[in-house]
Image (cartoon, rainbow, N blue to C red):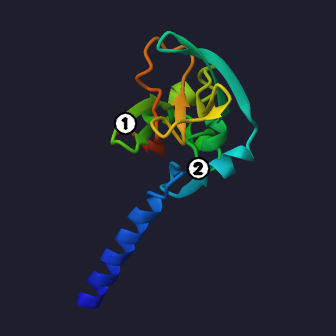
Amino acid sequence: MNLIKLIIVFTLLVSAALCQVPGAMVVQGVDGKSVTLSASDLSKLPQQTVSTTDHETPATFEGVLLADVLAKVALPAGEKFHSTAASYYLLVEAKDGYRAVYAWAELDSTFMDKSVYVVTKRDGKPLSGKDGPFQLVAPGEKRAARWVRQVTALRIKQAN
């Protein structure tokens, strides 16, 4: 019995360590399965450039569409989720413990035309240690409260 407990504890510790890989973020789908993505993985996705204002300062960000990152996992989309899609949300977690939420309807192109980005560069330079390696940028929001810096995880969940 003690060996089983030891194995369980070891497995949990290894799982936690994998979720905290420096320079990587965990993306968890609606089915609970996840992938870990690095900046190198994001560089293989279609690249986007977005010019916007950050705290009243013009800025140009480079990265990828959040939708392209989320496409790596199971999403609440299609006929199976037709009547429940609006009950899902995306939980964004940051290294410093900060969290933000996006309603799934804000991100699903069948509901709304709004682009959110996972960026790795600002004004042509890699994000600073304070902001990166990954930051969510949502142009058009009047407050940058959901512009999450140091993103470590993106988790799709359902409101109960």
Task: Answer yes or no: is residue 152 visible.
Answer: yes
Disc number lying in front (2 or 1): 1
Badge 1 element: strand
Q: Residue furthest left?
A: 2
Quarter holding the N terminus is bottom left
Q: Which residue is mark 1?
A: 99
| Percent coordinates x, y for residue 94 in the rendering | 41, 41
Determine the residue positioned at 35% across, 70% down. Answer: 13
Task: Answer yes or no: is residue 1 visible.
Answer: no
Q: Earlier in the sequence, mark 2 or mark 1?
A: 2
Query: Mark 2 to mark 1: distance in Å?
Result: 21 Å
Q: Which residue is mark 2?
A: 74
| Percent coordinates x, y for residue 44 in the rendering | 75, 47
For this view, does 68 lie left or right of residue 10? right
| Residue 14, placed above or below residue 75 | below
| Residue 79, placed above or below residue 10 | above
Q: Are marks 2 and 1 in contact (CB under 8 Å)?
A: no
Determine the residue positioned at 67% across, 51% down. Answer: 41
Quarter holding the C terminus is top left
Determine the residue positioned at 45% across, 32% down. Answer: 148
| Residue 9, placed above or below residue 50 | below
- Between 68 and 80, the residue placed more toward the observer is 68
| Residue 111, placed above or below residue 156 | above
The kind of residue on which mark 2 rests is: Ala
Determine the residue positioned at 53% across, 12% down. Answer: 57
Q: Residues within 10 Å of mark 2 (few under 14, many from 20)?
A: some
Q: Quadrant of residue 146?
A: top left
| Percent coordinates x, y for residue 98 in the rendering | 35, 37
Badge 2 element: loop
